[in-house]
Amino acid sequence: MTDPAPAALADREHAEPVSDEAAMGVAVHAAATVRTRTAPNPWVGAVVVADGEIVAVGATEPPGGRHAESVALAAAGERAAGATLVCTLEPCSHHGRTPPCTEALIAAGVARVVVALADPDPRVAGSGLAALRAGGVDVVDGVGREPVAAQLEPYLHHRRTGRPYVVCKLATSLDGGTAAPDGSSRWITGEAARADVHRLRAESGAILVGAGTVRADDPELTVRHVDGSDPLRVVLGQAPPGAKVHPCLEWDGEPGALLDELGRRDVLQLLVEGGATTVRAFHDAGLIDRYVLYVAPALFGGSESRPLLGAPTAPTIDELWRGEFGAVDRVGDDLRIEVVPPRARLEGVS
């Protein structure tokens, strides 16, 4: 490799050092690139900053592989000594499938570690930061807390509650219809929205529909259009023999008990895809953490189209269920609207 031109060296010398916040932004982006490949481990990003510039970037590998910190340290090589490592989540301090990241950071001679969040996993829960401090590493936490908490919300929810984070996906016309009176529903939304739904599937450890949806539509519930593994398929009720959803977990109990079972299976996120009766059961029980609506610029007209939620209808305006809008994005010709219950704020995230 040839030496940089003098002008380039001068520019580098006069460049502002990379801030912790800017480095955390790079780490968040790195984590996003592995979102569909790390579960049940958290999707984490890390960067090494030396002499005021980012010299290495890492992200969590698939289960059994290296954590983000180790990937970044390997890429940085000797430049890790005396450097700052910026990481979205507290480094682990226990032996699992891989050695503790805290030991690797101390051995590499990292002088400073910046994290957004402490890891609520009981095996970590602050012990990683304590181990770093005991090893002579300067530790700063809380940088980029809110965007990282949003990015890791399913993981954090699972570690706090023992249950998966529940996302409800709905596709609707402008006037709230999900299917025509004859039951036909393909396709309300366009190709871009359908591809985005498959991204949601790839991000989820399990996907759920009711037995009525299986009988009516015979869905495969697999991941297509995007890279990612197929989620565990779950049917609320009994799937007919020969249905494409097989093999699947058939569940006849309460939705809350199902979430307990999926949590024990290390499912971090459950995607509820329908139909209206199944969605209503989770909605009424207050078990949905995020609603994702794909709204098509289409109208059924009249009042005979099938609604988003099964009966009953709120009898008065005072009894309307009200949530809060999250992100609103255009996806192809459709809109993707996220709605969260009022309680689903970034509370209790340490």
Image (cartoon, grey):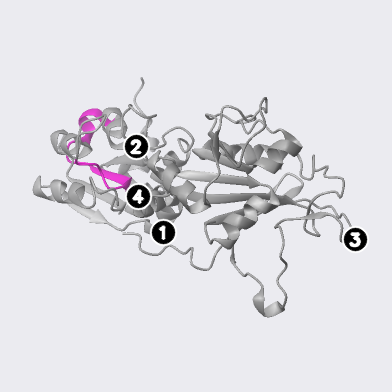
Residue 276 magenta-highlighted? no
Which residues are the magenta region? 76-93
**Amino acid type for the residue under numbered disc 4:** Arg
Displayed quadrant of residue 252: top right
Label 4: element kind: helix
* Label 3 to label 2: alpha-carbon separation: 69 Å
Q: Nearer the viewer, mark 2 or mark 1?
A: 1
Amino acid type shown at disc 3: Gly
Mark 4 vs mark 1, CA separation in Å: 17 Å
Q: Is residue 273 left or right of residue 78?
A: right
Task: Report which residue position mark 2 lands on.
Answer: 9
User: Is residue 328 shown to the viewer in this render?
Assistant: no
Q: Nearer the viewer, mark 1 or mark 3?
A: 3
Q: Which mark is residue 302?
A: 3
Find the distance from the CA under tag 1 to the CA under tag 3: 43 Å
Numbered mark located on residue 159 in the image: 4
- N-terminal of the pair, mark 1 or mark 3, is 1
Disc 1 marks a residue whose amino acid type is Glu
State whether residue 224 is above or below residue 106: above
- Which residue is label 1 attached to? 146
Q: Secondary structure at mark 1?
A: helix
Q: Earlier in the sequence, mark 4 or mark 3?
A: 4
**Separation of disc 2 and disc 1 at Cα?**
36 Å
| Number of marks in picture | 4
At label 2, counting other C-alpha atoms closer than 10 Å, the crowd grade (few under 14, some 14-19, many 20 or more) is few
Q: Earlier in the sequence, mark 2 or mark 4?
A: 2
Visible in this render: residue 175? yes
| Mark drawn on residue 315 | none
Indicate whether 268 appears above or below 321.
Answer: above
**SS at badge 3:** loop
Task: Tell me how far mark 4 sits from mark 3, CA to CA.
Answer: 45 Å
